[in-house]
Image (spheres, helix red, strand yellow):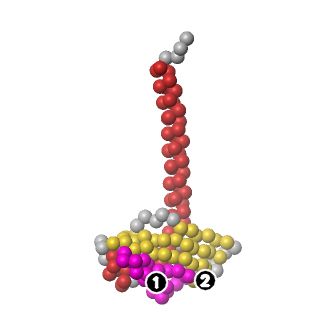
Amino acid sequence: MPQKKSSKKWWFLGCGGCLGVLALGAVGFVAFIFLVVTTAIKNTDAYTDAKNRAMESPQVRAAIGEPITEGTMFGGNVSNVNGKVSADFKIPLEGPKGKVDVIVVGTRESNSSPWEYSVLHAILPDGTKVDLKQAGTPAP
């Protein structure tokens, strides 16, 4: 006896529902990992130091205006190998006149040593790079 068409609909609906739940779970997992990585980077002294240097820079303030807010961070890396911490990330900042990206690449020998930046600059909306290494004092 041939199957009814209505039973095929329920079968597809059941499989589609299971696949939908799996896809939703995968999206949730990726969002969770993104949140964990972003939070870990934002909790470093290098992040706070670089953000403060950029926000205090007269060139950055003139280029994007005030108030300056943080944009959405989409990636980067902070690693700790045998006590030596390395950081490599980008901080997006936004103002009423535009956006800048603060590029940070640095290392720190221990928690009590200052950050040593090989790269610490802001890229203004017109493409100009503003060196932020000399601004402020290194984080302890």
- Name the residue rendered at 32%, 81% in the picture: 62
The relative height of residue 19 versus residue 119 in the rendered view (above or below) is above
Determine if residue 22 is in view. Answer: yes
Q: Position of residue 133 (x, y in %)?
A: 49, 85
The relative height of residue 42 versus residue 8 in the rendered view (above or below) is below
Task: Residue 60: name its quadrant.
Answer: bottom left
Q: Secondary structure at mark 2?
A: loop
The quarter of the image holding the N terminus is top right
Give the left or right position of residue 65, taking residue 140 as reference: left
Q: Secondary structure at mark 1?
A: loop
Cα–Cα gap, marks 1 and 2: 19 Å
- Name the residue rendered at 49%, 75% in the picture: 103
Q: Amino acid at mark 2?
A: Ser
Camera-nearest residue between 11 and 53: 11
The relative height of residue 136 versus residue 21 in the rendered view (above or below) is below
Residue at label 1?
132
The quarter of the image holding the C terminus is bottom right
Magenta extent = 117-140
Residue at label 2?
113
Q: Position of residue 137 (x, y in %)?
A: 49, 86
Q: Position of residue 32 (x, y in %)?
A: 52, 55
Give the left or right position of residue 43, taking residue 67 as reference: right
Task: Residue 64: name its quadrant.
Answer: bottom left
- What is the tally of numbered marks visible in this picture? 2
Inspect the magenta stretch and tell me whether residue 106 lies in it.
no
Camera-nearest residue between 12 and 38: 12
Q: Amino acid at mark 1?
A: Leu
The disc, 1 or 2, on the residue closer to the chain's N-terminal end is 2
- Name the residue rendered at 56%, 82% in the picture: 118
